[in-house]
Amino acid sequence: MADFTLKEIKSLEYVRPEIEKGYTDHSLHVDLSSKDIKINPIEPKVKEKFIGGKGYDLWFMWNSVTGKTKWNDPENAICIASGPLGGTPGYPGGGKSIVTTISPLTGIPIDSNVGGYFGPYTKFSGFDALEITGKSDAQIVVLIDGIDSKIKLYEVEGLTDDSYTLSAQLTEYFDKDKPVNISVVSTGSAAKHTELGCLNFTWFDAKRKRVRYKQAGRGGIGTVFAHKNIKAVVARWGSVSLKSNNPADFDAMKNVTKLHAGEINELDPKQNRMALVGTTHLVPIMNDHDCLPVNNFKYGMHPEAHNIGEAVYEHIFDKGFDGCWRGCAVACAHGVKDFVPFTGPYKGQKVFVDGPEYETVAGCGSNLGVFDPFFILEMNFYCDTYGLDTISIGTGIAFVMECFEMGLITKEHTGGMDLSFGNRLNALELLHQMARGEGFGLIVGKGIRKMKAIFAKDFGADSSIMQDIGMEAKGLEFSEYMTKESLAQQGGYGMALKGPQHDEAWLIFLDMVHNFMPTFENKAEALHWFPMFRTWFGLCGLCKLPWNDIVPEDNRQNPEPAKVVKHVGWYADFFSSVTGRKVSPDDLIPMSEAVYNFQRLFNLKMGYGTREFDTLPYRAVGPVTVDEYLSRVERYDKDLIENYKVDITGMETADKVAVLRKHREARYEQLKDAVYKRRGWTPNGIPTLETVKRLGIDFPDVIELLKANGVE
Amino acid sequence: MIEHTQFCAAVRLNGKLISTPSFDTTKIPDNAVIYLLPLIAGG
Ligand code: SF4
């Protein structure tokens, strides 16, 4: 039996708000400083404008923080919400949550979309959104018990920090007989020592009889969670059915659920085979297109990449249903059974690894110059149980390795570790150091932006080269796609609200391979439509993978194949049938636009959110070094000659690098102009007064904020 | 040679992934089963 104690310090019994058309119209607020627990109704005008999910999260945060709030101030809120459609069993991707907080890495709101059962269980327990503020003196567990209609706070002693073990122990503690009723949110031991902490959201895998988890990875939300002294937040709920959301039109909802799930069941085996290989099919495809990040995004392919792609993981993944929401037909959340780590506290023990997904494979594999699938599993396992974001870890260590190989840092700084590319044991040792709170791992755990400052100030490293190769923007590490040869994707990362994460826009193939958007205006249109539509999933409690990772067989015949118009129609039907608010496909974009612009304004409120903060490191735009240029010499020479009309006869490569840089940087600035215009923003990247009025987000404090920033 | 592959960055040819850079040079065996992969705006 587990060796820990939970002491109940507060209990609130409540009358559970019933669900009506996907909503409970109530929110739950827990203040860890005062131990106050409040249940508030959500006003109809908030519901109409912010829809749910990320919209609700941002609204509660906006009202909780000031422009001066830092991530570790007690008023910083962690908000978690599903959305009106979240919790629909059988609808593909129908059970996600969005988590937001002020990020320790960026100082602005971060949002992270995550699977597991927590969001839907919290909603069914009576709450469309959960907001946690304050800071507890003692380590605390929050329980939202929808079955017994109680909210409880516990002080906890003796509970492990390791998320892997903790999740299983708390699941058993809170419902030993029916573990499927429990979902646990927790972080791990490294979250409190670093700024890269993630959250693990669990679900109980009934077939394998074990607790599984998915991560709200980005932006250090786990660090905020640990700083507030939260050990776990637990939701408890019972049975779930198609009627749980009490939809407005049950038959219509059932019909669209059947259509979408049926199509995926039929076509996924012919297309990306995600039910078998998850997102690892992307590894060889990215590699073949010279887009797989290798050695800190320096190169885009490697002859050993096939060792870490679908062909290998298909055989390593444990066979069986892997939906991170009930009945999701895509079922792409794979895992590996009986993996035995060769380092760290779990060395020699059999563990279950949840993952890896493409991002982890590319970040903790190819980007570190490692093509060993088992090493990636070990990085994946320890990142999860230590509560670390695999993307920031991968991109961060890749930066460290390049600095080490360039001689910007040496063994003197790393505690004697050789951190050249490919050094697997020392990469793992960095994780263990982060968990133990010691050594060079503590510096790496601060993220690239702070590492650059420390390396320059304390180790005398050259700032300008680190600025070029440190793959962060707005303070957030890049996710694992190469943007150098796709201007549209440079915009997709550089102008993403929270920092360079691909969930806003993923346009590499449309732009680079298919040349689907040749003009600035075409690109700007894509950088309007795609981020807005992708935002919509986060408002509603949905996963976006079923939208475009499996597409109708006749999709190519559609004039706008990239939008997967048939699915957009299904989503409009799904929304209408659950909420009773009749919408057409054209209505979905304006819904998101209001929240998207509100988030941009939130950045502005926090002192960011203008043009200068949409800047990219040059490696995201073009080749930084001569050997990088030479690795794609034909492409770059052609670019200079054909696109920029440069006579390159007799030019040294170093000069070509410099000239290309001048042109490509100017081109990115031109793209910013086009995108801002399309989005209804000023040339400085701020939503205009006309835009906020059109979207109905012209609240008095928004108008004041705009005025303070010269927009009237 | 693999044809009719607009908006397709890769295909599955008898279960094996073939990406656009190899389309021109890939020989298709008789009775091959080819599926187009919808990698249009994924990630
Ligand atoms: S598509 Fe994959 S990630 Fe999305 S809900 Fe389904 S199983 Fe989870």
Image (cartoon, coloured by chain):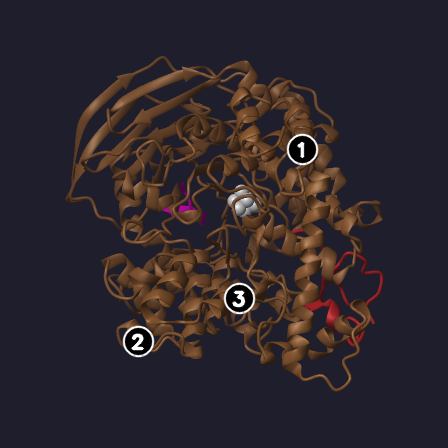
Q: What residue type is labelled 1?
A: Tyr
Local SS, label 3: helix
Residue A452 at x, y percent in the picture: 41, 63
Packing grade of label 2 (10 A; few <14, some 14-19, many >=20) is some
Q: Is residue A18 magenta?
A: no
Q: Quick check: A471 left or right of A397?
A: right
Local SS, label 2: loop
Image vertical order of residue A128 relative to residue A552, above or below: above
Q: Is residue A205 magenta?
A: yes
Image-quadrant location for residue A292? bottom right
Label 3 vs 2, first from the N-terminus: 2
**Separation (CA) of disc 3 from disc 2:** 24 Å
> Which disc number belongs to residue A468?
3
Q: Which amino acid does label 2 sit on?
A: Met
Report the span colored magenta: A203-218
Local SS, label 1: helix
| Residue designated by label 1 | A571
Residue shown at the point (32%, 61%) measured from the top left:
A443
**Separation (CA) of disc 1 from disc 3:** 41 Å
Residue A444 at x, y percent in the picture: 35, 62
Label 1 vs 3, first from the N-terminus: 3
**Separation (CA) of disc 1 from disc 2:** 51 Å
**Mark toward the viewer: 1 or 3:** 3
> Which disc number belongs to residue A391?
none
Q: Mark 2 lies on which chain?
A: A
Residue A96 at x, y percent in the picture: 50, 37
- Chain seen in brown: A
Q: What residue type is labelled 3?
A: Asp
| Residue designated by label 2 | A417
Q: Quadrant of ligand 1?
A: top right
